[in-house]
Image (cartoon, rainbow, N blue to C red):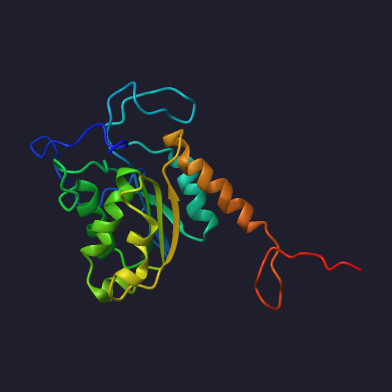
Amino acid sequence: MATNPTETDPATVVRMSCQIEDDDGDWSAPVMLIMRGNSAPAGIYEDENGNKPAWPKGALHEGPAKEYAVLKGFKPKVLDVTGSSKRGNRDASDGTLMALECFQKHPTVTAFYGFSGGGYNLWHILNNMTPKERARVRWVTAVGVDPDAPRSKFESSKFPGGSWTLDYSPNSDPHMFGPERLLEQAKRLANTPVDAVTGAGPIVPRKK
């Protein structure tokens, strides 16, 4: 997998329940859980400034991911854990398990945003929910995943009880700037005028 240079060693990670980066304790509704990508050593993934630091807790440009959540009407909460699999097993990924813990602990969580490895984990998170739990999910965003995780894989019709809106942005270069591209797309859509009667857009002026 092109976006998976490292895997988490099961013997080296201690699982902690529902850890959120810089959590302010405010879980008022609605909340979007944001999941980072895979861990990586220095020299592989760019940060927002083009540097290539180590990403021990998973790679993600958090600024645009959080801004996207706010734009869509959600309170962003970044899961403070890597999205790497456990030797290829994403059901056992700390990111998958911790996201499920947060979702089950906080009923205000109604949306998920997964980047790269976190995007791959999304399917496993949704698949490990009950139909009743899935009915609570209103929005799912998958960013920076390869063709082996197509849009159809995340559609709510594939999951009993699911009825969420899906926003899907496949991987393209530069990989790490997928969140920026998705945010700009969301901003353009937010600024596109729609017909007040039909709800369709953009509005095309009639010729006189």
Task: Give the camera-side residue of 85 and 57.
Answer: 85
Residue 65: image x %, image y %? 46, 46
- Left or right for 35, reference 207: left
Q: Residue at the far right: name it.
A: 208
Task: Give the camera-side residue of 21 and 117.
Answer: 117
Q: Residue at x 39, y 23 (%)?
A: 52
Q: Residue at the far bottom: name it.
A: 197
Residue 97 in view in this figure: yes
Q: Residue at x 27, y 76 (%)?
A: 132
- The number of callouts visible is 0
Check the image and report above or below for 188 versus 127.
above
Check the image and report above or below for 65 versus 158.
above
Quadrant location, the N terminus = top left
Check the image and report above or below for 76 versus 54.
below
- Left or right for 155, reference 10: right
Quadrant location, the C terminus = bottom right
